[in-house]
Amino acid sequence: MASRARPLGLAAPALAVLLLALVLAPLAMVGWRGAGLSLGPADWAAVRFSVTQAILSALFSTLLAIPVARALARRHFPGRGVLITLMGAPFLLPAVVAVLGLLAIFGRSGLLNSALDAIGLPTLSIYGLHGVVLAHVFLNLPLAVRMILQGWQAIPAERIRLARSLGFGPAETFRHLERPMLREVLPGVALVILVICLTSFAVVITLGGGPKATTIELAIYQAVRFEFDLGRAAGLAAVQVGVCALAALATWVVTRPTGFGAGLDRRLELDAPRGWRRWGDGMALTAVTLFLTLPLLAVAARGLPGLFDLPASVLPAAGRSILVALVSTALTTAIALTLALASAVRTRPLIEAAASLPLATSGLVLGTGLFLIVQPVAPPMTLALPVTILVNCALTLPYLYRILLPETRALHADFGRLADSLSLTGWPRLRWLILPRLARPLGFGAGVAAALSMGDLGVIALFAGENQATLPLVVAQLTGAYRMEAAAAAALILVTLSFALFWACDAGGRRAAA
Amino acid sequence: MLQLDHLTLVEGSFRLQAHWSCDRGSRIAIMGPSGAGKSTLLSAIAGFFAPSEGRILWEGQDLGPIAPGDRPITILFQDQNLFPHLTVAQNLGLGLRPDLRLSPAELVRIDEALSRVGLASLGGRRPAQLSGGQASRAALARALLRARPILLLDEPFAALGPALRQEMLGLVREVADETGATVLMVTHDPADARALGGHLAFVADGTVAPPQPTEALLRDPPPALRAYLGEE
């Protein structure tokens, strides 16, 4: 191909290098400061707890998702589409809001314990390992359901037709069709959730804590904020990177595309067995719907009255959160588009590395490294918001890049030559080809990035001073102070803003594409 | 004059060689079995495929270092010749100015080109609202506007029925007459080659044979071409 130096040709590698620097510089700092430090027994307890809770969360989320996904795969009922869409929402739901909702149901004075108390049974505590696992299942079960549902829908119609012609009952169908599919799909699902739970912070800071329920992420936070022991924080961060990198590597190995046998025909639904299985499917769907919606309804019920009596900190924090979300979304979208366009022609290792490396880190790891870098130059608190924006950018970029890459590849395959033959390059190519053709995935991706940045509680907790708190941090602080009505009101604003931003970006993209 | 100077195209184990030239204004049908490399040859001339050896020259100038859009070439692909999100008029406008900042005079030229190919008043439509034949006409109208000295056709009418295809070939001849363009057209069908008139270059066994007058070649084909045509 006749190649010509285009501005874009240089922009992508430059951005990839900047992004790598943004991730590697804090990692190097962490490695340098943390090297040679021996971790104490408390630190090893944190490592063990991190891994234990992540494994349990991944196991429960995955196993409980199987009956729900199967019910969705083989039953048709009004509201099925809505339910499947709803399963996509918790990924964008701010974790602090989820925690607050679970506290309203399972907490000390929540609905469940009030009921147990009323009939004279002992009450349950949500704090500790089981609370952390419960919240992680709440947040990740829907993701697992959607991934496993895709597995069910990917069973080739030819196999299903063969099964029907052989007169398979539910047991044979499970043995010959469903079990092989699950064996392929489940390890990947569990590992993805494991990685997410290893770096979870908002859940653990609220429901965990204490010597028995501290994760590495939380230990880093405590080392920086309370003990101001930056060396120890660096050591913990280095361990966290090692653990995450191992898990991310395992995910990458396990989730390579595996052939389930090509199906050429249109899709065919599995038979929906009658009898008790019908009731079983109905119960699975009812239970998961209640489990996912009741906590959020409880937040709404608690928060609505409080909207008229908000703590003074809420509105400025909301403003800061919107600012952080908008700036980091604009940055991330522009960078991800540039990288995905550059990778459209052929895979470029530098760009792949830059877009994947953030997955092996976490907000608190990057935060600690940046804290160490910034500290000699300026008081970290003065840079809380810029640092949060940068870290949000690095952590949401992998998602956005993965969303855009197949689209830029298709665009290149369909219209690359035509555009080249018409000298459609530079700004006109962006204006007349790329933006209109990619408006839909760009809008969706920007919406995901905006909601994730809006709801993220991570690095801001390390840096924020009195007047830099974002809305998720304010919600966490109010929850920690047991001011539940105020926390619920702030959470209501947070969740509304998150989904409003997602909706605005997504709908904007769809309208631009129409 | 278009010159293929000791041209060698390599893709994996596939090799294609060509060493011939043709005069300005020639009409050349390129025919041969599937996978013989007809499209690869057009890709190389259009600038999408770099030769391993040899050069492609137009009026003595080596096209090698020139980007596809800056070559003296308009190419029509098998499909996707129009951007589906732009109107027909905008698709034509790209042929005049890629940034679409069109002057009133240029807008008039677009309307004239549309009328010329029988699409008057359809400029505001999207390609999805056109029939296959109309989409081909729109692509030819853009070729008319660009008026580049070489027109490459990579089976753009393959999906059309025989009657419509003959109609399009007639239009191609008219466009070529008006712009004085040299036409290279890939086809499977000897009828298309006859309709284009001029010369025929047969591609087989890794070589693009020098173009011969079509009628004479088809009347007395060499063995490889005879085998391809399936005539006894």
Image: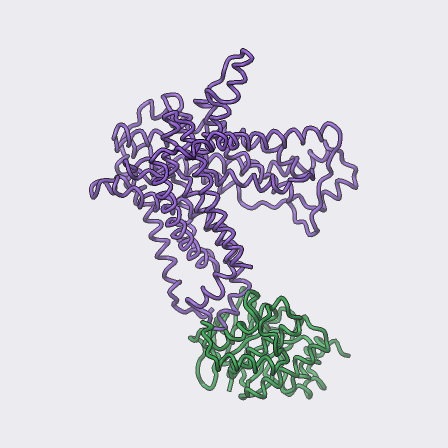
Q: Name the colour scheme.
A: by chain
Measuring from the top left, give residue A402's x and y in whole percent. 48, 49
User: How many numbered discs sit on the rendered protein?
Assistant: 0
Measuring from the top left, give residue A306's x and y in whole percent. 43, 31
Q: Colour of chain B?
A: green
User: Which image quadrant is residue B231 in?
Assistant: bottom right
Measuring from the top left, give residue B42's x and y in whole percent. 55, 75
- Furthest toward the front, the residue is A308
As rendered, which of B25 and A467 lies closer to the eye? Answer: A467
Whether residue A55 is visible, yes or no, is no
User: Which image quadrant is residue A484 in?
Assistant: top left
Residue A490 vs B36, above or below: the answer is above
- Furthest toward the top, the residue is A120
For the point 60% across and 75% down, the residue is B138
Give left or right: position of A271 versus B201: right
Measuring from the top left, give residue A296's x and y in whole percent. 51, 33
As rendered, which of A59 and A242 lies closer to the eye? Answer: A59
Q: Colour of chain A?
A: purple
As rendered, which of B141 and A355 lies closer to the eye? Answer: B141
User: Which image quadrant is residue A248 in?
Assistant: top left
For the point 31% across and 46% down, the residue is A386
Whether residue A360 is visible, yes or no, is yes
The quadrant the C terminus of chain A occupies is bottom right
Give left or right: position of B207 versus A100: right
Residue B173 vs B99, above or below: the answer is below
